[in-house]
Amino acid sequence: MTAVAHRDHPGLSVAEAAARLAAEGANELPSPDRRTPLRIAIEVLREPMLALLLCGGVIYMALGDIQEAIILLVFAMLSIGITIVQETRTERVLEALRDLSSPRALVIRDGQRRRIAGREVVRGDAVVLAEGDRVPADAILRRGSDLQCDESLLTGESVPVRKLAAVGPEASAGRPGGDDLPGVFAGSLVVRGSGVAEVTATGPRSEIGKIGQSLRSIDTEPPRLRKQTRDVVRIAAIGGALVSVIAMVLYGLLRGGWLQALLNGITIGMSMLPEEIPVVLTVFMAMGAWRISRARVLTRRASAIESLGSATVLCTDKTGTLTENRMTIAELRVGGRRLRAGDEDGWDGDFAELLTHGRLASAPRPFDPMDVAFHAFVPAAEEAGSEPLGVLVRAYGLRPDLLAVTNVWGADEGAPEDADELTVAAKGAPEAIFTLCGLAAAEVAGLRAQVDEMAAAGLRVLGVAKAAAGGAPLPDSQRDFSFFFLGLVGLADPLRAGVTAAVRECRSAGIRVVMITGDYPATAEAIAQQAGVQVGATMTGDELANLDDAGLRAAVREISVFARIMPEQKLRIVNALKANGEIVAMTGDGVNDAPSLKAAHIGIAMGGRGTDVAREASAIVLLDDDFTSIVAAVRLGRRIYDNIRKAMGFIIAVHVPIAGLALLPLVLGLPIIFSPIHIAFLEMVIDPVCSIAFEAEREERDLMMRLPRSPEASVLNRALLAWSLLQGVLAFALVGGIFVLATWRGMAEPDVRALAFSALVLVIFGLILVNRTYSASLRSAVTRRNGVLGLISAIVFGVLAASLAVPAARTLFKFGPLHPSDLAIVLATGAVFVLVLELLKPIWRSLSAT
């Protein structure tokens, strides 16, 4: 607190401020109704797939199969742990908003300036604002001096906006964005000037608070894959239970001993239990999150990676997402000549003079991004020998009637204002500079044509002029200098490197790119053209506001560039796209992006420049703000989905011969093939293959040339289900045929079991080869590298060889010895199985494509 009274605005009294704080509440967003880790854990345990894993583990433990029980329970605990961690982190969304909206503030109470916590600011407070301050609440500017605010967190605009003091007590604050309005808004940053503002809204009533309220009302889009696989699990579980009951009844009726029948039914039922499906989802998503993290992408909800692979529309913000969120000098114009950034051959003294005086007209220690851009060109000025020196003697700020700033510089400290060596530099809106220079109408017309040309290219255009002090005392107004026009400077927020290639690849993958920005239409269209976004008509926020939901749904089918869009309108656009059946991915980095990030199927936040609010509301965070990482995430998402389908097809196919061989001996009165040791061996093949080996499969060559799959397409559609059942039936027919023929020919029961079981293992590996790829040849499936599959194959065939060759192992598995002719039958069975399916695969592909 200081003892210096404020002359113009006494502010509230301490007592009145305390009363309003008690009546209206603190200047912060309300604490969210947080879900505790325990509450999240209970919700997770209600998931059918996790419940299936836990029940399977308990049943295996009851049967004495500790190893299988431990495997299932570990996977269940891993899935539960990952989910709890991810869901707990999402609960920090509103906390990040509360921190951002409640900085410390300098207010006037009882006529004195007091520094207080932002949460203690109340309606009616007089807030003192200066460069570098974060505005603590929504307010009306009552007195200001060249005040400019960066409102990009709320609007997405890359350029700060000018603020003018309100005239009269009834002045309206307006909405964030746009120049010459009196409203300043919570969370925005003062980049230039100073002022005093009267608070009009705090906490949830502020613009940033309204975004927080919107976030609370939006539910995160549930993963479609999880909903689909839940149905698959339910159907498969019912099928497995049915096979188990049939086996138990047949055993009891045909062989007697109902207790043994019950145990036999449970064993067969466990062999049919589709516990691999939730294991597949858990492993694939966890491994996918790890793989994408190596590309500097953080996955906050693992299922979002798969969802991103199915995205049909990518909605992207402009500022900080497609562009770098910083101003740079892109073009200089002097006397009709043009010099673009990086074109060093055209550099001469005229351009150096223009640039030097542009910098002299900027703040010595800049906050304003445009001032920063002029200072960033210091090396170029040094090369031209025109590095500005001296000290700032006087500054003339922006005025409502003259949008220009003028700085007067002296050669050294203490130079008098009437010194001959003073340098005067001005920059500002081109029309204001034309007026200061007193240009003729014909000259102004030609310059305006240049300004229009530069603005159409998305540049923010400034005029620059110089004057001589002439040794007289400095005037009260910058209008009284005799200015000479130097030229025009075009500034731009440059496109990020690699964006154009990333947009091109998205389009080749059938993903439509839509730009939604708070910036002006000309700037948006220019950036969209540079990035390769298809530009037709551009819709503004005012035009969108006049559309009802049905009209907006029709508009978003055609329009790819939206400009001057407010936060709630971004949310409307996302919801309209979703209503059209699109799978929507949304990128962004500001507070204004948070509602649409949360509402989209996949929210993608920029991690470097992005706000905590945007990161916490999103499912995926790009740690290095590299837009091209989105393409890597899309590719990985498609690969994950492809491999999940392969694993699902394998799971369905492999259980058909197991079920058939479990029932066949009971129906025909033949020796039982499977005992718990055989089931455990088969699980040793099935579980790691479908959960680890298929996850490690590389992507198909045409992966990024395919159109996105239909949002309604099931992970296990009719075509894939039919193909999997065909594979399973053929496998059962071959192995079952060998089993029946060998038994009828009088082969000993241990020999038959060894022959049939070995053939089944070979057929299962045939299923792996067939399902490794749906588009490439058998040669590719055999030769394509997969270190995990190679290791699993070596272990499985090693154990199988030991069980057939080592007497103690043969006794454990109840196997007889296999002769060379038997091994030839086993190998021939596997080869015939693979060749027949490879011949049928093209037919299946053509039928499933129609």
Image (cartoon, rainbow, N blue to C red):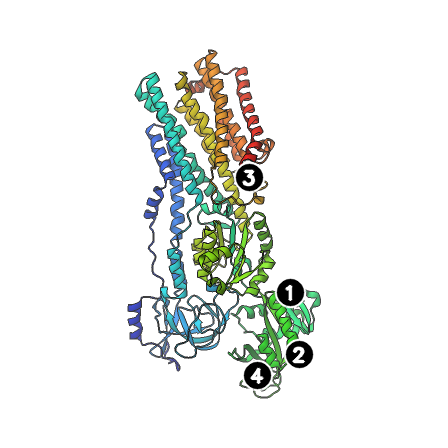
User: Amino acid type of disc 4?
Assistant: Arg
Q: Give the quarter of the figure containing the C terminus.
A: top right
Cα separation, mark 1 vs mark 3, equals 43 Å
**Residue 440 or residue 538, whichever sits in front:** 538
Q: CA distance from mark 2 to mark 1?
A: 29 Å
**518 to 3, vertically: above or below:** above
Left of 452 or right of it: where is 608?
left
Residue type highlighted by circle 2: Ala
Distance from label 4 to label 1 (Cα)? 31 Å
Q: Are marks 2 and 4 in contact (CB under 8 Å)?
A: no
Which percent across, then down, holds residue 617? 43, 55
Q: Which residue is mark 4?
A: 479
51 vs 194, nearest the viewer: 51
Question: What SS does tag 3 mark?
Answer: loop
How far separated are the C-alphas under marks 2 and 4?
21 Å
User: Would you say residue 387 is visible in this rendering?
Assistant: no
> Farthest residue in the top direction?
746
> Do the residues bearing badges 1 and 3 touch, measured as CB atoms within 8 Å?
no
Position of 511 relative to 356 (above/below): above
Q: Residues within 10 Å of mark 4 (few under 14, many from 20)?
A: some
User: Which mark is drawn over residue 698?
Assistant: 3
Residue beneath label 1, please?
A: 341
Residue annotated with mark 2: 442
**Numbered badge on residue 664:** none
Q: Disc 2, disc 3: CB below 8 Å?
A: no
- Residue 11 sits in which quadrant? bottom left
Q: Which corner quadrant of the image does residue 144 belong to?
A: bottom left
In front: label 2 or label 1: 2
